[in-house]
Image: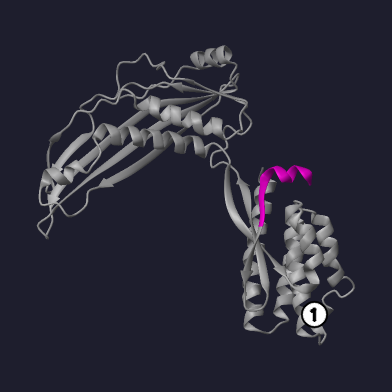
């Protein structure tokens, strides 16, 4: 189970929560989620390659006024591929998943026709893998950026303006020593708006960024999004443990991440009783301690990476909370059912990795 610990980071600061029936404590857990795209999963050295052509200045920049097109603008986007590739490089490098991430920012594309996408020849890709000792190439073949700037008079007599920017890209992953490749597209869009308080059209337009500034920012966002899609992510969630007088010894062990010691303490409350706690006419305190102990044990087993036992004790806690026959007991059942669903989802992710 030790290898499971690499998929979880604990911020074991316990915070008290006041509840109607007793106190609860929560702590933060960072869960590792697999990458949306798994094509680089087994690669260790990655080279990002610029294989784009510079977008013509006059292509894709529309100006509109009061719903009608009034012309096109010119925008220098000669640095757009660099912005996208650099952001993707930073994303891959920052993930810590790869031994080396390098960037070839000078375009390797010798074509002269921007409007026809040209992919890198296999022999050229293999040569780059050999030169850079790369397991894989992440090649940007095409980046298209376009925008619309519009201003119009509102019914209130003021002017409103917006800039809508769009990005489309095409990428190829080439694997060293293999004929197979994987290609995919990535798109993104961003919107900037002026306030709706100006009585002068030029003032509303002045609130917007320049087209070049907006499109280069979008190129960077698209590159980062592409890199993020190829790397695992971390998501923070909370786990709640119960505190009643009978659970104090286990809680102290839990504070110091002594999971098994905490489990052993809480098992003493359940040992020998089985589900008789549900059936017998026990006092409310007995029912409460047993239900809270089972819920806490589930979390302690999760911290050890034992999702089977964690699910078992979560299900037991659901049954035990049901023995309360109170609104609070029903609410805790709902809470634990949600936790059980999270456990089962996490267990499925671990199996898939």
Q: Give percent across and percent down for residue 244.
A: 74, 73
Q: Nearer the viewer, residue 166 or 118?
A: 166
Q: Give percent across and percent down for residue 243.
A: 72, 69
Q: Nearer the viewer, residue 110 or 227?
A: 227
For label 1, the residue is: 286
Residue 309 part of the magenta segment: no
Q: Name which quarter of the figure residue 134 lies in.
A: top right
User: Which residue shows up at 51% across the image and 39% down it?
Assistant: 229
Bounds of the magenta span? 1-13
Q: Name which quarter of the figure residue 290 lies in.
A: bottom right
Colour logic: one colour
Q: Give percent across and percent down for residue 282.
A: 81, 85
Mark 1 surroundings: few (<14), some (14-19) or many (≥20) residues within 10 A: some
In the shown orientation, is residue 25 left or right of residue 67? Answer: right
User: Which residue shows up at 71% across the image and 76% down it?
Assistant: 321
- Which of the image's four quarters has the C terminus? top right
Residue 6 part of the magenta segment: yes
């Amino acid at each position: 189970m030790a290898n499971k610990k690499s998929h979880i980071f604990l911020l074991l600061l316990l915070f008290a929560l006041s509840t109607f029936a007793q106190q609860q404590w929560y702590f933060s857990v960072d869960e590792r989620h697999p990458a949306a795209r798994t094509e680089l999963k087994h690669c260790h050295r990655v080279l990002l390659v610029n294989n784009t052509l510079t977008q013509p200045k006059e292509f894709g920049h529309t100006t509109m006024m009061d719903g009608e097109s009034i012309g096109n603008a010119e925008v220098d986007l000669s640095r757009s591929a660099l912005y996208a590739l650099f952001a993707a490089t930073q994303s891959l490098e920052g993930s810590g998943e790869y031994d080396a991430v390098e960037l070839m920012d000078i375009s390797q594309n010798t074509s002269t026709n921007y409007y026809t996408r040209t992919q890198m020849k296999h022999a050229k890709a293999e040569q780059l893998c050999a030169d850079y000792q790369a397991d894989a190439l992440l090649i940007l073949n095409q980046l298209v950026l376009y925008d619309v700037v519009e201003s119009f008079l509102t019914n209130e007599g003021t002017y409103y303006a917006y800039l809508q920017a769009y990005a489309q890209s095409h990428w190829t992953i080439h694997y060293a020593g293999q004929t197979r490749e994987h290609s995919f597209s990535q798109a993104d869009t961003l919107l900037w708006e002026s306030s709706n308080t100006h009585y002068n059209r030029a003032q509303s337009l002045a609130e917007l960024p320049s087209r070049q500034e907006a499109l280069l920012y979008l190129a960077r966002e698209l590159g980062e999004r592409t890199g993020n899609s190829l790397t695992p992510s971390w998501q923070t969630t909370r786990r709640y443990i119960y505190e009643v007088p009978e659970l104090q010894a286990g809680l102290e062990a839990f504070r110091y991440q002594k999971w098994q010691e905490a489990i052993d303490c809480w098992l003493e409350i359940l040992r020998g009783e089985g589900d008789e706690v549900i059936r017998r006419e026990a006092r409310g305190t007995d029912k409460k301690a047993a239900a809270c102990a089972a819920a806490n044990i589930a979390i302690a087993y999760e911290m050890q990476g034992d999702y089977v036992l964690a699910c078992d004790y979560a299900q037991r806690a659901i049954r035990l909370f049901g023995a309360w026959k109170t609104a609070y007991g029903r609410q805790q059942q709902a809470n634990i059912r949600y936790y059980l669903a999270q456990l089962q989802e996490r267990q499925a992710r671990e199996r898939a990795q």
